[in-house]
């Protein structure tokens, strides 16, 4: 995987969102919000930024009468995430710092 | 760094300790996502109790007991299993194919057949040997295997999924 530092992904909240989404096909808005401890508006804002970059796809559906919003990482977003992680690993490896497995 | 900060204004010079802490955060979030879809330990206990109830009911040889216990136990086990699968499926869906892969799927199928085979094999074996309460004994053994093996299976699946996740720490 080519290493490419992605400035859009790197801010902590967006990195956390993208990391979570990289492990799943898609996740419910509430799951992301609760896992990251964000407010609805803060998460919406970050998801919109990622959606504008085509990194994330937002899906709105109804389950019965209840609206349900879910998000998934696009192929572009997943590639950008992998390249960003590779870039971070490169920085760490070049310095010899140890990363405790997460 | 504030959340609202755009990529365009970010400093490209990331210190190694910042990169290391970002990687640790990536790992933490992915672990949490994977943990959210794993079956909790109490699920195995409920299924085991249901199994033993069926076994004990079979050994009573009472049509009334069988007519009551078996449907109730089956509804509880099946309902709980479906709620586990579809409840988790609705909230979050992991990348099964990439994360679990062949070894993960094989572990799930193998474990299921092991429990079913052990319980039924033991029940029929004990019955053939003329043992007292063969179905109860077999389901207690099968239930114990479920309670011990279920969490071990989840631990193995977790390890497989963490090993296959995108952008894992080398």
Image: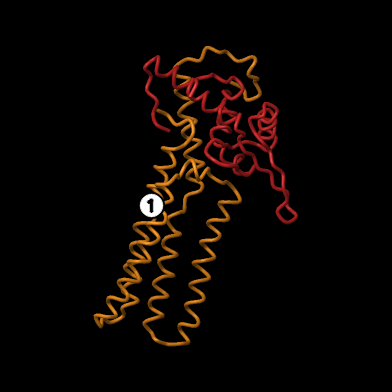
Residue carrying label 1:
B153
Question: In the displayed structure, does residue B30 sit left or right of residue A44?
Answer: left
Rendered residue at 70%/28% (across/down) = A52
Q: Colour of chain A?
A: red
User: Percent position (x, y) of residue A45?
Assistant: 69, 31
Task: Specify whether B137 is left or right of B158.
Answer: left
What's the residue at 36%, 52% (across, down)? B152
Placement of the N terminus of chain B among the 4 image quadrants? top right
Figure quadrant of residue A75: top right
Q: Residue furthest left?
A: B129
Q: How is the image coloured?
A: by chain
Chain identity for the colour orange used in the image: B
Q: Is residue B137 above or below residue A58?
A: below
* Residue for point 40% across, 28% down: B170
Chain for disc number 1: B
Please state the horizontal and vertical placement of residue B55, each as a whole percent of the image: 38, 76
């Amino acid at each position: 995987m080519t290493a490419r530092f992605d400035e859009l992904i790197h801010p902590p909240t967006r990195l956390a969102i993208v990391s979570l989404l990289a492990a799943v096909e898609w996740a419910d808005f509430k799951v992301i919000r609760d896992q990251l401890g964000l407010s609805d508006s803060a998460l919406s804002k970050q998801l919109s930024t990622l959606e504008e970059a085509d990194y994330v796809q937002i899906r709105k559906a109804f389950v019965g009468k209840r609206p349900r919003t879910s998000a998934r990482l696009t192929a572009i977003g997943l590639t950008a995430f992998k390249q960003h992680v590779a870039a971070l690993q490169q920085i760490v490896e070049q310095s010899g710092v140890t990363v405790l497995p997460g | 760094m504030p959340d609202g900060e755009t990529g365009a204004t970010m400093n490209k010079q990331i210190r190694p300790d910042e990169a290391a802490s970002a990687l640790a955060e990536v790992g933490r979030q992915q672990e949490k996502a994977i943990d959210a879809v794993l079956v909790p330990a109490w699920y195995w206990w409920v299924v085991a109790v249901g199994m033993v109830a069926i076994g004990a009911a079979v050994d009573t040889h009472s049509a009334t007991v069988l007519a009551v216990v078996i449907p109730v136990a089956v509804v509880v086990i099946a309902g709980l299993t479906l709620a586990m699968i579809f409840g988790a499926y609705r909230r979050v869906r992991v990348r099964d194919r990439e994360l679990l892969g062949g070894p993960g799927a094989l572990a799930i199928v193998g474990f299921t057949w092991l429990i079913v085979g052990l319980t039924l094999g033991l029940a029929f074996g004990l019955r053939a040997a003329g043992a007292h309460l063969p179905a109860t004994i077999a389901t207690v053994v099968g239930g114990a295997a479920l309670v011990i093996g279920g969490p071990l299976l989840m631990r193995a699946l977790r390890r497989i999924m963490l090993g296959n996740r995108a952008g894992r720490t080398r």
